[in-house]
Each structure stands twice: as structure tokens, then as C-alpha cells.
Amino acid sequence: MRFSKLLLLSFIALTFVLSSCKDDEMTGGDPCVSNFNQKAMFENVADNLILPQLSDFQTKVNSLEVDLTEFVNNPTEETLLSTRVSFKSAWLQWQNVAQYSFGPAEDVFLRNSVNNFPLDVEAMQAKIDNEDTDFSSPDAYDKGFPALDYLLYGLEVGESGVLTFYQTETKYSTYLSAIISDIKERTDAVVAKWEGEYRTAFIENTGTAAGTSLSLIINGLNQNYELIKREKLGVPSGVLTLGFANPTKVEAYWSGYSTALVQEALQATKELYLGQEKGGLDGLGLDDYLQEVNALKAGDKLDDLIQNQFDVAITTLAGLGSSLSNEAENNKASVESAYAEVAKNLVNLKTDLPSVLCVSITYIDNPSDSD
Amino acid sequence: MTLTEKYLNQPTRIAPLVTFRVLFGALMAFGAIRFWANGWIEKLYLEPTFFFKFYGFEWVQMPGETAIYGLFALIILSALCIMLGLFYRISTLLFFLSFTWTQLIDATNYLNHYYLVCILAFLMIFLPAHRSHSLDVLRKPSLKRAKVPAWCINILIFQFCCVYFFAGLAKLNYEWLFRAMPMTIWLPERTDTPLLGYFFQFRWVAFAFSWAGALYDLTIWGFLLNRKTRAIAYIFVVIFHVLTKVLFNIGLFPVIMIFGTLIFFSAEWHERLWQYISRITRVKKGSQRISQNDNFEKSPPFRGGGGLSKMAITLFITFQLLFPLRHYLYSGDILWTEEAYRFGWRVMLVEKSGNATFYIKDSASTKKQEIVNGSHLTFYQEKQMAIQPDFILQYAHFLKEEYETKHGFKDATVTVESYVAMNGRSSRQFIDPTINLSKIKDTFAPRKWVLP
């Protein structure tokens, strides 16, 4: 009979396969199957990280708006300085929020609207001159915190120089107000959704498929991590541009506290990875998930590798001077080494972490069919 | 009757070929329209500035923005003509050329079922599938034939058998059978599937799917060949491919196979199908019915017995039997090295992701740079490049060229730090990071620069 022959053939082929068997380097039982409590982790991330961070950001945006309004109505050195203080604290807090770029934040292009940098000064100047305050394009680099950075610090050297722009012309004030209301509007929308139905949906959305909360967290973390690596450190250091440093392309060029921003961002990434509340409890996070599936990389625990590298990178960043722009110009090697230490964790976070948790990186999706 | 007589020359009724022609043309037209409507022309042809090539087809160029739309229009038009049997010879030739052209532009988009379409289209150029139930016959009744030589149908049957068998053979590996990979990763992602979804969370289901899939591919063609089991086998074909369509993003492949395997059915079955279609569409009886006057003998050009065509058929069959097996010439795990991976019916076989960071250095100065892949490649190209050695090499050569012409590098050195994670494992280094890729030529020789 033809079919018994076929079956026989298959089994002969099978024995060939068996003979070429190799040992499985995964030891922790079945791959992709674990008893890890995803819901508990999502609950921790939502209630102890995302919601408090977002709400803190909202508060800081609100006080920035109050100060800015005060400044616009009454541009004095005093109001300028108090605006700058609330501006810095809002921008620092943004670093804790940036990685939650999915769901409600994605709906309103929060990240692109709030922190596209480096600023395109010419494009912005043209908009100011035309009194154009349309910030709907996520691809524009003429708005958000980088624009405020320029408008509060960069128009002229020294406070009095900056003040003249607001004392003599209304178009700068108009633009300033428009920027902060745009940031506020989007932030409010995101907070409202998280405080509304999205929190529950997020916690309930278990599994490993694209669009599940696990995939959203890992994608958000990685997208942001790549931004830290490339935009915040790589571009200024010059490793991506033939070794020529780009001191003007740092995040906070005019105010000069870019280093603090990148430090905050990296710390926030580590906290999300650990599931750790700011200054508080270390709850369920990706580290616990990796431990649960007993993920190994070349014999070492993947979680250990990731945590150690976070710490090395954070220590290296701590050694940078406060102005990344200065460092890039005068002490390029220090920025290069900070970049290198941040880069070292990328493969762990972007390739290993999703692979051992059996999640696909969805922000690089197949545009067409696969087979 | 000799074997040649039986399988090549014996006059066989044309009906299966007609069904195949109509379905193939309709499906191809639909496929191209779908591709266009989904915006994939823009995404896959207009967005990239750099294209990966197939070995030996580096000369195939992207034809330009207007021309690429023209090319797709030509695919749609010629596919419709194939369906209707209008200007069939020229339509099949044009379809084959235009479709294959679009496939050769960027190897990133390689799919096994597109390769299958290229082969089927190539065969159709030589198959007299327009000689009944076609506008050509209406236009020129003398073209009409009731019978064709058996090879015209058997060659298609052979091709579908190949696809199944080699797809099954490829599944006989440790990962697929004993780790149930990549099903273990993919099935739990589909737990929202109606009815079946609940079961996908269990590991044993992944094993069941893997083994059933392998067994299906290895044997289904045999059951389709056998007259007694054919009907049941076809029900399995439909169930299997509908299931893959529901579970995975595999586009037209399931439909191609569900339509294509109808070729296994007897001429009587196809004739009944056409009579049924004529009845319900109220086409006047007789006008489309296959003539009983067998004027087969008047069509010697299609006879397989002639020396040249017999040789061509033998050559084709030999190629199809041997080419998918060429990976046995290489040592190393084909799932990892991807050496000789393509054109072998390796379908949905592995889950991989990678990360490749390139460094370029000038030999004449201290100039060096880390490459931002996104400046040259689309996300999808980057994703594919990171796991395929020949793409990594092509890209390295492109970088050398780019930096030598645009940035004045002399004799640039290109190295890569690349890591690939496969089937739920952590990553390993993929390419020897010390190798200057700009000095490596891609050949059929084993790639020593790919780490085991």
C-alpha cells in the first residue's frame, strides 16, 4: 500500500532527526509556559507606576501652566525664574512618563507632541512669525518642552534679553501659551483615560500576543530605551556621525540640564523593568517574570545581566557633567562611554527579553503577509 | 503503455486545466488588487531606498514610481486575461515576467507562496489551458481542444506534491517536533480565536499541531493522488488551510493551495463542475460544453513525447526535486544559518529576531562610525536583515560603497555586532564580529563568518 509506505518513509526520516538531537539549553521547564501572574504585574505597573507618575506629571504641567500664564501676563525676571523652576520639574517628570507611550498616550501622540528634539528653530521661528499655533503634526519639531527650552532660555543670553521678547511683542507670548495648552490638553486626555476605563482594560489584557499589556510594556520600554540610547546620548556623542560630536543636538540645549534628563529617563526605565514604585516598593515587574521562567543567557541569569548593566550604565551617567552639550564638546569620551554602557543592555532588553517571554516586538511589524 | 505514454502523452480531458486556469487568474488578480489597496506598493517598493537582492539577480532594478504601479496594473490585467482565456499565451508570459519582476526587486519580501506563483505562472506559459472555456476559443474556434497530453495536468500535480512533501520534510527537525517550536510561541498569541482559542494556552496543543502539521504535509499529497481517499483528503486540505489562515498572517497561501489542489480531481469531476456552473449561470448548453469531437491529434506542439519537451520536463522535475535539498550540502543548522533556506518550501518554520549594529572604519584615517540602520533601511528590512546572513553581507557592501563615495572613506572596513534569538531562547552572537564584511564575497561556499 502506498500509504503504509509513506508512513514508513516518515518514520525513517524521523529517526534521522532523532539522531541529530541536541540538548536544550533552557532548563526551567517548558518554554513560553509559566505560572507568572501577569495580572498582578499589570496591576502593580498601572497602580504604582503609571497612574502616580502620570498624575504627578499632570500636576507639574498644571503648575507650569499657571506660572507661564503669570509670566505672559506679567513678564518680569521674577515670573521668568519661577516659570523656569516649574518647567524643569515638569520636564524631569516627563522622563518618567515617556515610556508609557502606548494606549491613551499613543492616541494623542503624547511623546512626539511633548518632547520631539532637537528643536527645529527655523521652523518654529517661521510659525511664531506667522502666528501659527497648529501642533497637530507628530512629525514636527517645533513644539513641546524643547520649544519651551528655547523660548525661556535661548532667545537671548541672560534673563533681561529673554524678557524683552515678551515685553515688546505679543507673538512670542501667544506661542508660549499655545505650547503649554497643547501639552496640557494631551496630558489631561491621557490621564482621564487611564483613570477611566483603560486601567481595567490594561490589567485584564493578559497573554503574549501583539497588543496585550505585556507586549505594550516591553515595546514601550524598548522604544524609549532606544531613544535614550540614540537621541539623548548617541547623537550628541558623535558615534553616529563620523566621530564629530553634536553638542547642539542635546535634549535641553539652552537650559543646559540635559544630563539630569537622561539620568532620570534611565532610572525610570530601570524602575519599570523592576516594577518599582518611585522611591518605594519593588513590586512585580519584568525581572520577576524573567526569574519565573528561569531565563538564562550563555549560562548566566538574564535578569542578573540586565540589572547589572542598568547599574553600570546609571553609574557611568552619574559621572557626566550637568551639561551634556559641554561634555560632548569638551569631554567626548565620557559621553561615548555612557552611550556604550547604555547600548550594552539593548540586546538584552530588545532581543532576549521578548524572546524568552515569547512576545514579539510589534513596533516592527510585517507590513505585508508572511509565510 | 509505457510510463512516458501514460504520464506524459496520453490524451487527457482538458477540464482540470481549465478550472485551474480560471481560479489561478482570478486569485492572482485579486491578490494584486489586494496588495495595491493595502498600500503595500508604497510600503514595500516606494518607501525603501535600498533593496536586498537574490543571488544572481542583482541586476533586477526597482522600475521607478510610476512604473511600479504600471507593473502591478500589468499583473492585474494579465491575470484577468488568464482567467478569461484571452490572448492566453501572451498573457501568461506577461504575467510571469511582471510578477517575477516584482518579486526580484527586494528579497526582503520573499515568501514561499510567491515563489510557487512564479513557478506556476512559468508552467502556464506552456500549458494549453485556454483551449476550452475561453474567449480565445470564442474568438478562434479552431483552437478548441477536448483533450491535452497528460503531462499538462500531471506537472501541476507534481508541483503541488513537491510543496507539501518538502514542507513536511523541513518540519522533521528537533525544534519542530520536540520543542514544538515555533507553535509554542505562536499558538498562545491566538487564544482569542473563536472556539479553538481556549486550547492554545496548553503546551500539548502546540505539540499536537506540530506533529499533525508535519504528518499532514508529508502524506496529504499521497491521499490526494489516491482516487479512493481523495474526497476525504480534500476535506482535510480545506480544514488545514482554513485553520492556518485563521491563525497566521499568511495572505493568499491557503487559498492558492485550496484552489490548486483541485487539480488532483478527475476530469469527470471537473466536467460536472463546469456543467453545474453552466446550468446555474444559464449559459446556453453546448456553447461552453467540451466538445466530444476529439481533435487532440491536431495539436502536436503540446505533446510531451517530443525529444525537446521531454527533456525540458525531465529537467524541471529534477530541479524541483533536488533544489530544496541543497542544504544537505552544508553543515550547520539551517534554521540558524539560513544557508540554502529559501526556495525549499520552508514555511512558518522558525521564530527569530535579531539586532545588528554595524561599524564602519576608514583605513586612511581614524574616522569611524556606528551605523543607524534606520537611515538606510525600513523597519521591516532591518528586521529581516538582522537574521539573514546574505542580507547582512549585502548591507555591509552597500555601507562600504556609500561611505566611500559620500564620505570619502578609503578601503572601508565594515564589522557587525549581531545577535539573534531563536524559538524562545535568549540570543547568541550571529556573525563573527572581527570579520571585515566588506572583503567577503557571497558565494555558494559555506559561510565561515556565520557563527555556529
Image (cartoon, coloured by chain):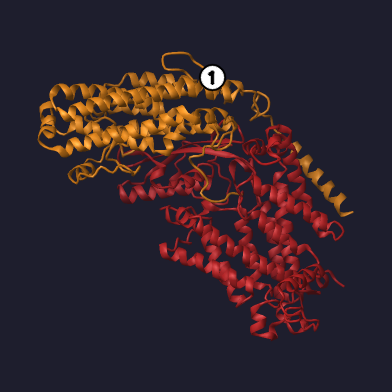
Chain colours: A orange, B red
> Left or right: where does residue B202 sit relative to residue B231?
left
* Coordinates of residue B451 in the picture (x, y in percent): 55, 37
Number of on-image labels: 1
Which quadrant of the structure image shows residue A125? top left
- When the figure is inspected, residue B408 is found, relative to residue A180, above or below; the finding is below
Q: Residue A295: in sight, yes or no?
A: no
* Coordinates of residue B193 in the picture (x, y in percent): 66, 41
- When the figure is inspected, residue A200 is found, relative to residue B114, above or below; the finding is above
> Left or right: where does residue A292 sit relative to residue A334?
right
Q: Residue at x 43, y 19 (%)?
A: A311
Q: Residues within 10 Å of mark 1 (few under 14, many from 20)?
A: many
Q: Residue at x 53, y 52 (%)?
A: B109
> Left or right: where does residue B62 sit relative to residue B153?
left
Q: Residue furthest top?
A: A280
* Coordinates of residue B289 in the picture (x, y in percent): 76, 78
Q: Chain of mark 1?
A: A
Q: Residue furthest right?
A: A1
Which sits in the foreground, A29 or B254? Answer: B254
Residue that badge 1 annotates: A284
- When the figure is inspected, residue A332 is found, relative to residue B317, above or below; the finding is above
Q: Residue B228: in sight, yes or no?
A: yes
Q: Quadrant of the C terminus of chain B?
A: top right
Element on which disc 1 rests: loop
Q: Quadrant of the N terminus of chain B?
A: bottom right
Q: Which amino acid type corresponds to the residue marked 1 in the rendered image? A: Leu
Which sits in the foreground, A64 or B8? Answer: A64
* Coordinates of residue B58 in the picture (x, y in percent): 49, 58
- When the figure is inspected, residue B229 is found, relative to residue B335, above or below; the finding is below
